[in-house]
Amino acid sequence: MKTDLERKLRGDISTELDALRKELEEKTREVNKAKTLEIEMERIKRETKEREDSLKLKFEKELNEKSSKIESAIVERETQRNEMKLAERDKQLNDLRKQLEEAKTQAEQGSMQTQGEVQELALQELLSDLFKFDSIIEVPKGQNVLIPSSSKNSIRKRVWCYCL
């Protein structure tokens, strides 16, 4: 009986042990499967993060490139605008210089004309003082002068003509 009982117990233990081993193997497979899934999930997370980072980097590069193009366009437009303003100011300055030169020339010519008129008046006065008995007449510019002869008069008169 003892042997039968031992056999029965051993059989029960053996059956139970086999069941526990099967359960252990099943649990081990499930754990391994879970680890494999976790590893795969971590790999997918890493790859997704790498793709996101790659896309972010690509986006940032494109954004920087577009920003640079826009900035260059703005700088070029502003440079052209400033060049146009400078060209306008240069033209205005040159026009003002030209006007100033013309005004100087006119002032000098006017001044020379005035000097000539003053000299004519001084000459007329000098001639009148030097030759009190002579006639001094003004002859307009570009006109010819005819002087009548005074042979009948005993005193001879001289006629002095000067041009404007």
Image: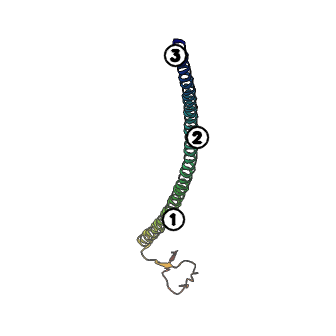
Q: Quadrant of residue 14?
A: top right
Residue shown at the point (53%, 61%) measured from the top left = 91
Q: Earlier in the sequence, mark 2 or mark 3?
A: 3
Residue indicated by mark 3? 5
- Disc 1 residue crowd, few under 14, some 14–19, many 20+, Cα 10 Å: few
Dot in front, 2 or 1? 2
Q: Left of 82 or right of it: where is 125? A: left
Q: Is disc 3 placed on a helix, strand or loop? A: helix
Residue shown at the point (48%, 69%) measured from the top left = 113
Front-most of residues 43 and 62: 43
User: Alpha-carbon distance for marks 2 and 1?
Assistant: 75 Å
Residue indicated by mark 2? 51
User: Alpha-carbon distance for marks 2 and 3?
Assistant: 67 Å
- Disc 3 residue crowd, few under 14, some 14–19, many 20+, Cα 10 Å: few
Residue indicated by mark 1? 102
Residue 49, position as x, y percentages in the image: 54, 38
Q: Amino acid at mark 2?
A: Arg
